[in-house]
Amino acid sequence: MTVLDSYARDLAALDAAHLRRTRRSVQAMRGTRLTVGDREMLAFCSNDYLGLAQHPALVEAAQRGAAQWGIGATASPLVCGHSESHELLEHEIARFLDLPRALYFYAGFAANVGLVPALVGRGDALFCDALNHACLIDGARLSRADIHVYPHNDVAALDRLLAESGAARKLIATDAVFSMDGDLAPLPDLLRLAERHDALLLIDDAHGFGVLGAGGRGSAAHFDLRSPRLLVMGTLSKAAGAAGAYVAGDATLVETVMQRARSYIFATGAPAMVTEAVRASLRLIESEDWRRERLRAHGARLRDAIGDGRIGRLLPSDTPIQPLIVGDNRAALELMSHLWERGLWVPAIRPPTVPAGTARLRITLSAAHSDADIDGLIAALMCRPSDGMP
């Protein structure tokens, strides 16, 4: 067997386990309607929670930004890739979150793989929830700190691990809203542990920003948390409908990230046309509470209709992420295919993204969905084929 044959063998193994991913090309987007090939699909797969990705205010802001600054940032932010637009956005994010300082990254994955190694390294201790997102996991590995993984949301286990650590620097890292389960981390308890054990708390608020808290200020605002030990990372490609990410918190910590995060120092900055779109998005997030109210209503409508377990196990979630546990990989793919044939795009999520035996449909809701859209999804789920279903 040649080295090339070994990769073909690996792909065949993915096929046999129903684990190969498929990429589809979207030709057009009209709100929650996506054109794929010659079909229009109603999407329940997007993270555009507030329906802002195609909002005219964001499009116009991006066009103005492109006209003023061009398409590319041309260099790292620490060279000449940091425009006045970037500077204004960072101040506006800090004001919006009521935190001392914010730093803008070109992507959320880049933010986490950079900021974790910026805060801890060899000889330090890092404490991670077992269900953390891949970017936090990769950031942890790159840090070379001593990594301690605690069971999902198990505060008592984390307390024991922190008490046993003699490291001078300790960092607790967790998703705020877990992307595949839709549940929230017990952030008040985690912050109390950080205070008790002289640690920092880093929360990834990718799926909480714009959705939770007063005015959409995120998970920390949802729990009314304030502390110089708290550092918040949030993405601007989901509820904000644009691109990039921020790191916000104590000014000394944020400056440390800027000085040490390799994914910030050595990467070209995001175009100013994107930061202008984000600035427009922040104004809509803050002022249009009806979008969050509609999201909550959609979630309640879905849970009331399919929460009895006849279709699968709907995990408890008060966020736009509504995971329907199917269990078997093949059964999840069959249910996804059943919905696809009815014009509904709902992705099947399988290992290694989720633990073995917990394959699921990850239903994501948007304020751009109508009540009729939700009802159509419910009807299609209720009339699923029985063959191969659990």
Image (spheres, rainbow, N blue to C red):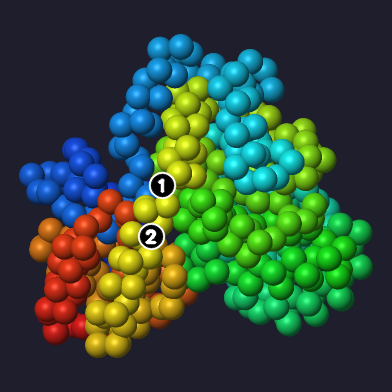
Pinpoint residue 310: horizontal percent, then vertical percent.
24, 88
Q: Amino acid at mark 2?
A: Glu
C-alpha distance separating marks 1 and 2: 9 Å
Foreground of the two, 328 or 184: 184
Describe residue 129's horizontal placement relative to residue 119 as left or right.
left
Residue at the spot x=35%, y=40% of the render? 53
Pinpoint residue 206: horizontal percent, then vertical percent.
52, 53
Describe residue 257's horizontal placement relative to residue 135 as left or right.
right
* Figure quadrant of residue 284: top left
Foreground of the two, 91 or 330: 91
In the rendered image, the vertical position of residue 37 relative to residue 160, given as above or below: above
* Figure quadrant of residue 29: top left
Label number found at residue 151: none
Label number found at residue 293: 2
SS under mark 1:
loop
SS under mark 2:
helix
Q: Which residue lies under the disc numbered 1?
A: 288
Describe residue 366's horizontal placement relative to residue 389 as left or right.
right
Task: Tell me if residue 337 can be seen.
Answer: no
Foreground of the two, 302 or 12: 302
Describe residue 244's horizontal placement relative to residue 264 as left or right.
left
Residue at the spot x=64%, y=39% of the render? 95
Q: Amino acid at mark 1?
A: Glu
Residue at the spot x=87%, y=76% of the render? 164
In the rendered image, the vertical position of residue 137 relative to residue 233, given as above or below: below
